[in-house]
Image (cartoon, rainbow, N blue to C red):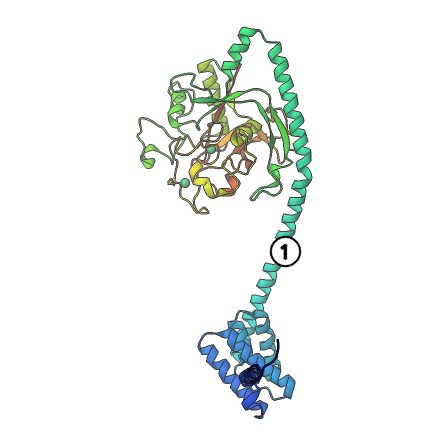
Amino acid sequence: MHSTPRRRAIAALMLGLAALAAPGVGLGQNLPPAIHVDRHLAAADMHMQDGDATAALAELDRILELQAEHDVEIPDGFWFRHAQAAWAAGDAERAESSVIRYLELTLQEGEHYRAAVDLYNEAEAARLAEEARLAEEARLTAEARLAEEARQAEEPRLAEELRLAEEARLAEERRQLAATPLAERARLEELRRPGRVFTDCDGCPEMVVVPAGTFVMGSPPTEEGRSDHESPRHVVTIPAAFAVSVYEVTYGEWRACVHQDECPDDVGTLATPDRLGIDESTFDYPLGGITWQEAQEYVRWLSRHTGQQYRLLSEAEWEYAARAGSRTARYWGESASDQCLYTNGREADLTCSDGYYLAAPPGSFRPNEFGLYDMMGSQMEFTQDCWNDSYHGAPVDGSAWESGDCADRVARGGFYRSAPQRIRSAYRVGYAADFRETSMNAFGIRVARTLK
Ligand SMILES: [Ca+2]
Ligand SMILES: [Ca+2]
């Protein structure tokens, strides 16, 4: 582009304007630097009054530049004002170093001595807290990276084990089928038809057939809220379909056993029909406050009463039934955010409301893919298994683990006062077999039936 006289005139004008606009240059450039120091001090005061500490700090920093360029004297109290501005601007590190400069220069003689000591303490505490926060953040990041590496390292092995286990299960199923007479085969097929719902007596729990299958038990190292009790992850085969009670056992169902003098009458003190506002004649809410031993009495009675094999679920069966094909932390997904659609839990840590502080009637929320309600939340459910600290040596055929710490039994699923990290498919906890939780009636029963 050619430069015309007009263009040259405009360029000269712009240069002149730029020179006028540059601080410290132009009209005031011949003034002594000390006057500019006073100007910046005044501007800093104004910004502080306006609540703009960042702008105030920038003005005070200009004074430091002037000192470096022209060796002007730093005014009295400068470092205290600098520290105050830095503190107000959220820069605790600079606030601390500036207030130290102030105290070094003035010792105990400074006009702002007391306030400076206070600011020093505050800034130091803030810096230490920030350092601790950063260290914790770095630790968590490193931990998360290691967990992710561990998860990725075990995924291929688990996938291969799962494939082989499923193949073996199907081969065994075909072998058994071939060895079964035709009429018997038809009876078994109907008996074990997944999703079939039945009741074995008036007042017995409603049952649903859960299919045979294979699954990965335990939580991945990356799962939020997990504990080491939930590892190592391992593949479990559930060799045959079995039935699981659709809901947790209710007070009404328990009363049927009580009426025959085979179950104790004195369980459950908190979630009474009166307190829950439920019609007392129905007793239609989850039984709570029972011991593992009483749960055994109930399934023994149910077996005698119906002539069928009722029992508690093994821990592996429980997790298989709860997951219902899902591999996420919860059967509705990875996060707790949808919990209120699926169960009754403690709402304090959630962003949703499930509408129940105490127990909720069965069927108040959505079931999982197997048609089971409240596997998690509502009542904590005892399983048959003895407590073991980890899954090292755990059975992989779906049977109950009857060795280990057998004074304690495994309970699953969390309950209506549990925090979200306990309302996960893999969460497990051990309680004494004779422990009765009376403050919140926290333990209930879900039953299983063998299908033969
Ligand atoms: Ca609730
Ligand atoms: Ca439950």
- Residue in the foreground of this view, choosing between 398 and 370: 370
Write the residue at 60% across / 12% down.
Answer: 177
Q: What is the x, y in percent for residue 416?
A: 44, 38
- Residue in the foreground of this view, choosing between 123 and 7: 7
| Quadrant of the displayed image that contains ligand 1 | top left
- Residue in the foreground of this view, choosing between 330 and 121: 330
Write the residue at 36% across / 28% down.
Answer: 284
| Residue at disc 1, secondary structure | helix
Q: What is the x, y in percent for residue 238?
A: 59, 23
Q: Could you classify mark 1 by the number of other residues whose Cα lies within 10 Å: few (under 14), some (14-19), or many (20 or more)?
A: few
Kindly identify which residue carries mark 1: 138
User: Does the closest atom of ligand 1 sit within 8 Å of the Cβ of label 1?
Assistant: no
Amino acid type, residue under disc 1 in the picture: Ala
Q: Is residue 127 above or below residue 422?
A: below
Image quadrant for the N terminus? bottom right
Query: Visible in this render: residue 432?
Result: no
Q: Is residue 67 above or below residue 189?
A: below
Count of numbered circles on the image:
1
The quadrant where residue 94 appears: bottom right
Q: What is the x, y in percent for residue 375?
A: 48, 32
Q: What is the x, y in percent for residue 248?
A: 44, 28
Query: Visible in this render: residue 74?
Result: yes
